[in-house]
Amino acid sequence: MRTVGPSAARPEQIRRHNLSTLLRHLHLHGQVSRSELASLTGLNRSTIGGLVGDLVDLGVVSQRSPTRNSKGAGRPAYVVVARPRSVHVVAVDVDVDSVQVAAVGLGGDVLGRVRWQLHDGNRSATAVVDDVVPAIRQLTASLPHSHRVGIGASVPAMVADPSGLAVYAPNLDWSDEPFGELLGDRLNEPVLIGNDADLATLAEQRRGVAAGLRHVVCVLGRVGVGGGVIVDGHLLRGARGYAGELGHMSLQADGPLCHCGNHGCVEEYVGEAAILRSAREAGLEISALATLFEQAERGDAVAGEVVATAARWFGRGLANLANVLNPEAFVASGHLAEVLRVAEPSVREGLERGMVTIGRAPITLLQGGIRDASLVGAAELAFEELLAAPDLLGTPRPAS
Amino acid sequence: MRTVGPSAARPEQIRRHNLSTLLRHLHLHGQVSRSELASLTGLNRSTIGGLVGDLVDLGVVSQRSPTRNSKGAGRPAYVVVARPRSVHVVAVDVDVDSVQVAAVGLGGDVLGRVRWQLHDGNRSATAVVDDVVPAIRQLTASLPHSHRVGIGASVPAMVADPSGLAVYAPNLDWSDEPFGELLGDRLNEPVLIGNDADLATLAEQRRGVAAGLRHVVCVLGRVGVGGGVIVDGHLLRGARGYAGELGHMSLQADGPLCHCGNHGCVEEYVGEAAILRSAREAGLEISALATLFEQAERGDAVAGEVVATAARWFGRGLANLANVLNPEAFVASGHLAEVLRVAEPSVREGLERGMVTIGRAPITLLQGGIRDASLVGAAELAFEELLAAPDLLGTPRPAS
DNA sequence: TCGATATGTTGCCGTTCGCAACATATTGAG
DNA sequence: CTCAATATGTTGCGAACGGCAACATATCGA
């Protein structure tokens, strides 16, 4: 029988857990007073004092003297704040036509950023790595007193394992490229990689419209349609890390053929190409989705119907997801955020027609808006190691 | 900003956590030696000694003298085993046409069982409660020295909250019946309720074919088609507890109308009624699925094609789920286990056609076979409170 | 019979947090 | 301006927990 193995707890892990909790709060919510930390965590004031002291000793947070504008009586509480330049991560976002590399400080501030276009000559995995490495060195050089605690990369690909292998990136012509390993070997440091839509979802749930929600599904419309699923506050990876391929859920078994080989995929109804095709079939001469949305908003009936049709299909896709996952909210981002903005009633129509728990489980529809979502998500991914065990800062890694 | 609130850890919770880990092992895996527990958990021998001593003091486990058949040199290890009659839970399984009530001991043994048929006169929620209460009293009376640590109930309904409300049970004509509360009030004890398919899934993952798997989806064919999703070893409930309505995922937007109001639901292709309808349409005069499967197995081409068609649709449904959830295995149970047994290649055909990660993420298909799955799941649900905090045994509940 | 091996048991130690008492800093009333 | 009230920071002590080393115990095999 397979062993479950919920590992045991040891006393020193308590402190690690509590340090992690505090640093997570500070990383995500900015400045928090010590007494707020105490009531938030339920820990004793004295314990909070000790924990914050440890974090100060580690150099990752600072305590600011009591604030001026204190409300009510009593001694003003120290304000604890993450030090953005104490430690940083490097976030890499490989998109279909550009690459972005950023240094992100604790707390989420972008401390530096480099961006370049991709073309046929520099699109291969090794070429991207060749360009990313000097970009990282340049960013690192600009942060002489900041310790790098992780590297995270977002790729528009199915990612088998966060520690390395990008399996299949049709839009980059990558196949089985071990992008994370390639980059990691060059830097002599482990690189965590994630699917771009997964990481965008993480960004929305950490710092975007879905901040703090525990059960969210994000659907991202870029060139393809991807998505991510947050279950109980954690990004769902599944058995092999391939969860969240929402764009290839089939809504119509005999629907249009998708490049993935299946028929009637969500992507074939609400993907960028699909909507544009449907606009052309409706007689519209349009080359960009923005134009279509604009026309629809201005009241053009034909454009409106094209968008509404896509919106209803989008809603149907969400309905299927709602039946399976019962999230508290959906986040639509990329051009799907526009679809939601322009035609929310149609999205709802599709959603409510297909949701078996309609009326029982109200679902919020949110427009994802966070900038550079995948980049932010990659940074969050990279910070995870530090946040999980702040006391290990500066300790050599167990081997990569 | 919504607060995440990963609660803090305290020293006494360590022991609770470790007691919980040990008791869970013993409850699920039967007898385990003390040294096995030590290597399983990573805890020190002395710590294991203390923890097991606590569990013995609580009365829930016993240590048997060293076994005869020890292998190799060294002092034989004590064997620790859950005491089946020390504590028990009551599990209630309300099915469409019958009700079953059982007392289940720690470790999973059924210590007593009562079952009766449902008909129009005793199908209402209050009538069921009226019959369940004396059945529970009778079972309890037969276990004079066993402490009851929980009551769990499975209902074929959408369940809003484990502590009470069954929202909608079309097959029982229940609507907004607070079955759990009704029963709990009569017994003056909280009752946990769950969806029958969810609990069957739990049973398969705890004690069935999917034992120990961390990412599983179970699809259950009874009168309707339901299911459950296990994510990272935990049953997925979703925001409001409605996750897992797999039978109402739509596979064909313009497919046959389902009683839920949507078109092309999985249930309309692989539900019992749907398969029988399809058999009739194929010219077969058949009144039970068993007959159909039998004919298909004997080589009847028409029956075979009816089953194969259902199997392909079933596979398509699984493909959608695989794209979203990327489980390591699917479990088919109820008549869908038969479909899988008779026509696995067709199921795989549907699955592989729709799975975007095909070839990357091999998926095991399992026939769920555990008897009285929902009942077993209800018992597991009821045991959860004890397993999560064994040290609280005998402590009065915080208020129901 | 005795060494090797594996396991159980005991006493001590380090770590962690809670708690109570005290110290400190601010507000607001008189 | 003074002082009580209030909220927070700080300190020292105690309780709970697991690890560890040393020792005790039980079996096997030569």
Image: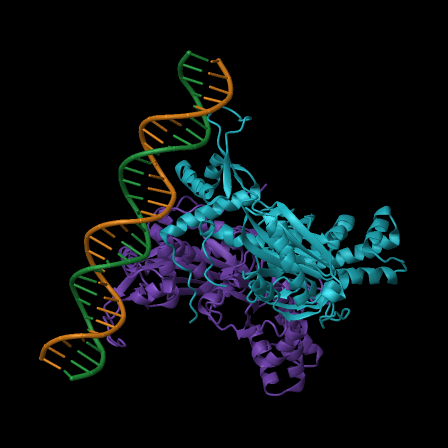
Chain colours: A purple, B cyan, C green, D orange
Is A295 placed above or below A327 here?
Answer: below
Count the marks.
0
Q: Can residue A135 be seen in this view?
A: no
Is B348 placed above or below A96 here?
Answer: above
- Expressed as whole percent of the image width and height from the top left, the position of residue A254 reads 75, 65
Is B170 placed above or below B393 here?
Answer: below
Residue at x 49%, y 55% (from the top left corner): A193
Position of the N terminus of chain A, as image quadrant, is top right
Residue at x 57%, y 73% (from the top left corner): A363
Q: Which of B189 and A323 is in front in this view?
A: B189
- Expressed as whole percent of the image width and height from the top left, the position of residue B324 reads 61, 60
Left/right placement of residue B141 relative to residue A75 reads: right
Left/right placement of residue A40 relative to residue A203 reads: left
Q: Which of B292 and B153 is in front in this view?
A: B153
- Expressed as whole percent of the image width and height from the top left, the position of residue A24 reads 39, 61
Position of the C terminus of chain A, as image quadrant, is top left
Q: Nearer the viewer, residue A100 or B178?
A: B178
Q: Can residue A325 be seen in this view?
A: yes
